[in-house]
Image (tube, rainbow, N blue to C red):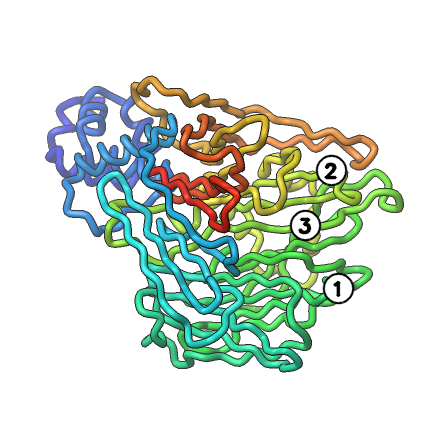
Amino acid sequence: MNSSGHHLLPNELWEHVFLYLDYPSALRCQQVCRFFNSIISASANIQYHGELTMDGMIDTNASNLPVVDRLALLRERRAAWHSLDWQLFPAQSFPRSYHAYDFVGGTFAILLNNEFIAITFPTKTSEGSRKSHHLDFAARDFAMDPTQDLAIFLGEQVANDPVTYIYVRTYETIASHPQSEQSRIAVHLNERPHDCMVQIVEDLFAFASSNSDESRLDIRIWNWKTGQIVHDHSHLVDDADQGRAESFALLSSKAFAIGIKTDSGHISIWDIDSGAEVSRLCLPELADPDEWSLESVSVDAPPYLAHPRPDRTFMTSPGHRVISFSLTYSTGSVDLRAYILSDFLTSYATPRSSDQDIDVPWEDWGPLNTRVMDAGDQDDSDTHCQGFRVALAADDYNISVRILDFNPRRPAVRDPSPSDAEVVSADSSTTVSYPWIFEKDIETHLPYTMHIRELPDSCPVDVPIILLDECHVVPIGFLGPGSEVDLFPMAI
């Protein structure tokens, strides 16, 4: 390229042009000529926004740091996750008699009788806090989004009363939320739920419950600001053709997924606006459905923050999350985990024409877009997802933090510092083989890296759960035979 044409535009304008490219395209432009290479490699703005996108993050626009410092912080955080370079803070404790807990955006909260306790963990640059509020109602479960100053509680159902209530409160004070037109929403139930879950995504609040014999999954979704129900699936019963609905998760404000137990099982994708089932992603075929069966399918979706936290420079993009499906076959003899990216699942949430088949065979979607692993001795509660990462619990044989990272586009760490962490990359396929259960071996290709580091000596051997968010790894364990559970916040 004739260099005389380069300087018809100032360097600042060239930089502005390159900012419109995605990062891989910008990197390719560096190879075009020395002039382009000098513009791109010298621009902290291009490097920062490009690497931010590759990391699956977005800028919060809340920081006054210059771009060059934000880029340095982004690379420092990436390197810390790569090597699991954490800073251990003093343990926090809470009673074992809690009803429910949630961990969202650096805040761990529990429901204990009529008390709501919220613990904000310290980071490497900020202090933590702990506060508690007395509730003027009995609650069974809750969900929260601190970025909306929002906590929504599911009231405890009184015996023989078919009505329970949902309470829409502020996270900071537990007062009625000023943006909600109805601070208390009545819910009619046929019986006390055997199991339930609650979830918040932007303006939506979802409540799913199963009855005592688990033959029915009730799903209801409200707009918590208006108090109006936007989707009512409160009579989802066993059906010979459709199967049993076993679990539920909001994928976004536009779509949700249901784990369906049929002979081989499938993941049902629903469009919220139309209220229609739009896709059925079939799970691997069983060799002999009369002899073997899918016993259960449960789903774990990461928490969803509607807005950036004001104390964070960047945050995980809401659309970039990994969803974990737990699959149990033949009375627990085989337990598998299937990890799928949320943006892939939502790509199947577009309504189809009436003549289109909504069933998608496993071979057409599963092998290239999932990673199926043998779960071993872990149960459904042993994994915790945040963004592209999944924390696996420690076990008796490997007292370590194990983090799966399903972001194949993450930039390489520059000059990684020496670390005790082990990093294992899985770019090729892996195979799960149970020929007596499945018609074919389950070969999957979704790339990931596993980061492994031993727990600090101060953490107990019995660590059943490890939580994580964008800048914390938090083992939960028991230091002794007492009546308290201990949290061990470690800032990344």
Residue 170 pos. (x, y %): 35, 69
Circles 2 and 1 in contact, beta carbons < 8 Å = no
Amino acid identity at mark 1: Asp
Amino acid identity at mark 2: Val
**Which numbered dot is residue 334?**
2
Q: Could you tell me which residue is drawn at 42 percent across and 44 percent down? A: 487
Is disc 1 placed on a helix, strand or loop? loop
Task: Give the residue at mark 3.
Answer: 297
Is disc 2 placed on a helix, strand or loop? strand
Circles 1 and 3 in contact, beta carbons < 8 Å = no
242 or 176: nearer the eye? Answer: 176
Amino acid identity at mark 3: Val
Task: Give the residue at mark 1.
Answer: 213
Query: Is residue 125 in sight in this rendering?
Result: yes
Numbered disc in front, either 2 or 3: 2
Is disc 3 placed on a helix, strand or loop? strand
Query: Is residue 404 in sight in this rendering?
Result: no
Q: Quadrant of residue 2?
A: top left
